[in-house]
Amino acid sequence: MKIKRKLLNTFFYTLIFLNSSDLFSQQDSIPKTKSIFWQKVQFGGGLGLAFGNGYSNFSLSPTGYYHLNKTVSVGVGISGSYVAQESNPSNYNALGYKSTVFGGSIIGLFHPIEDIQLSTEIEQLRVNRKFNGVNTSNDSFWNTAVFIGVGYRSQNVTFGVKYNLLYANQNNVFAQDWLPFVRVMF
């Protein structure tokens, strides 16, 4: 008899507790919806982290996109990175290297068909480099790049390649004029 009563009391109090949680929950009678502007906004970007034998590389590049319509989007991005390579005491010619790069970009995306993404991008970066070794030197400059690109898009991820129209061998952040990219949007 006592076990039945305890079981019945436990069931009764559990039932009251579960029902009272609905009474005290904070629910609006009007559902919240995003404004039309925020419904057309997507965020994305990149995050990089690499370590090696005396080498480290950290990079962060968030991007925001606004969809003008189903085929055209515009966006802005910021980027920053830090790269360091320790000098090698066993190799007299091996230089130590530190670099910080930061800047921003304006991006245009065009989707002629759902799976293809064409892009244009203007990027301005401030580059600060310091070499340590036999000849210690510092180098700071602005690097401007104008990219055109094409990519294959599958849902929120685009894989592609872009070409730097302003590529020059001197004072350039990029090792070559063609660059692969992966663009992820949320």
Image (cartoon, rainbow, N blue to C red):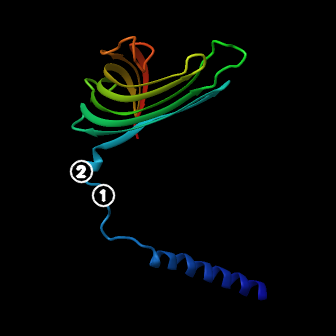
Q: Quadrant of residue 176?
A: top left
Q: Residue at x 26, y 34 (%)?
A: 73
Q: Is 13 displayed left or right of 4 in the figure?
A: left
* Amino acid type, residue under disc 1 in the picture: Thr
Residue 104, image x and y in percent?
A: 34, 34
Q: Which residue is nearer to you in this view: 32 or 106?
A: 106
Q: Nearer the viewer, residue 7 or 23?
A: 23
Where's residue 57, x and y in %? 56, 30
Mark 1 residue crowding within 10 angstroms, few (<14) / some (14–19) / many (20+)? few
- Residue found farthest to the right: 2
In the image, is 153 to the left or to the right of 121? right
Report the residue at 72% width, 87% height from top.
5
Nearer to me, 112 or 164: 164
- Is residue 1 visible to us here? no
**Distance of label 2 from label 1 (alpha carbons):** 9 Å
- Residue behind mark 1: 33
Q: Quadrant of the N terminus?
A: bottom right
Residue 141 image offset from top left, x and y in percent: 38, 25
With respect to residue 12, does 58 lie above or below? above
Helix, strand or loop under label 1:
loop
